[in-house]
Image: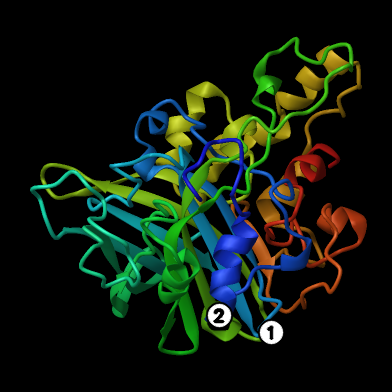
Amino acid sequence: MTPISRSGLGRRSLATLVCGALAAGGLVAAGVAALDPGAASASSHREAPLISGTPQYDNTDLYAFVSPDKPDTTTVIANFIPFEEPAGGPNFYTFADDAQYDIHIDNNGDAQSELVYRYTFKTHRKNGDTFLYNTGPVKSLDDPNLNITQTYDIDLLRLHNQKLVSKTKVADDIPVAPSNVGKASMPDYTKLRNQAVYKLAGDSTTFAGQADDPFFADLRVFDLLYGGNLSEVGRDTLKGYNVNTLALQVPNYMIQESSKQPIVGIWSTVQRRDARGYYTQVSRLGSPLVNEVVNPQKDKDKFNASSPWDDAQFLKNVTNPELPKLIEAIYKIKAPAEPRNDLVDVFLKGVKGLNQPPNVRPAEELRLNTSIKPSMHPKRLGVLDGDNAGFPNGRRLADDVIDASLRV
């Protein structure tokens, strides 16, 4: 996050920046020791026409896993605002004041939210007569030299059959970690980041701030002929970019339907407020890669505005996917026969006997069995390599979801 260049010089991984900070507050990501800048992959950066022009409202990635530091809790990390240039001053990247950033929990497999953690933000300016983000060295989150700050609230919404039952404020006026302007401005950024980790009632913990994006990919892949002769050498063309991160750790019992039904479905959405004060959903993300490479152009914006309850309209995109045909055309690897009902089981229902809830309604959610303990030795391919604590049973920061998905 040091604004030197996009080369990655002086940068730290999301595991170090977010998880290192959250460890101080009891909020740690899976397999921290195994995480490095090339240890994770991404799913939803500028993946649809409309959202590509409004990055403050764009979900980029969602992670959910049983916390290795506290196995009786679940950690959810939702990232937003893709391709943040670290040297992005003097107007650094902020969460939108006119948006609701939601983390949805479906704890009975009915493709509806039973719980929603809603984050809303407010930007504060101490001195409007300067263009500076900070007017001197910043040593604490309440330092008068920190000119631009953000705070946030969290509301917990409980719903039944898509109708609001109750709304409880669980966090009020919590400071967001500032962007890392540099050593002169923020000589001890780790201290500032740690101050942004907040304990909530009920043994929950929250963090909001900027972090190095764990997304690694060679975007030349979208050149249809690139690599046709199998001579390509991968290069991380996204190295060095940041994202804005929300991290939430909550006790498992708070999100489970019961101890006998510990499987939850998770997704994140963003709703944007219009001129009349009404909110409209503009972004949605559950399992990785779905809106990126599964949904065709005509469905991408529709998917971002939809809910899992209505996912039957996108079923053909899963049973008759385009990507295997492209791989066959370029690499001559024969595509599996259609319809791909195996993909329906893995990505819309969950894996039977692992993270498929009883009486499940097929829907695109990131499903996690919260009763499965974290692995002491995480494997990047997760379930495919015998590690049931990894993708597609949730998603850890180090899970290689691209390789795993291509092997299904």
Is tag 1's residue or tag 2's residue first in the polypeptide sequence? 2
Q: Nearer the viewer, mark 1 or mark 2?
A: 2
Say whether residue 179 is left or right of residue 379. Answer: left
| Residue 3 percent coordinates (x, y) | 47, 44
Say whether residue 197 is left or right of residue 92. Answer: right
**Residue type indicated by callout 2:** Ala
- Quickly name the residue at label 2: 24
Residue drawn at x 69%, y 84% is 260
Q: Secondary structure at mark 2?
A: helix
Residue drawn at x 52%, y 81% is 25
Q: Secondary structure at mark 1?
A: loop
Residue drawn at x 64%, y 61% is 15
Residue drawn at x 81%, y 16% is 227
**Is residue 398 placed above or below 228 in the rendered structure?**
below
**Is residue 16 placed above or below 330 in the rendered structure?**
below
Neighbourhood count class around disc 2 (C-alpha, 10 Å): few under 14, some 14–19, many 20 upward: few
Q: Is residue 256 visible?
A: no
Direction front: furthest residue: 184
| Residue 376 percent coordinates (x, y) | 84, 74
Q: Is residue 7 visible?
A: yes
- Quickly name the residue at label 1: 260
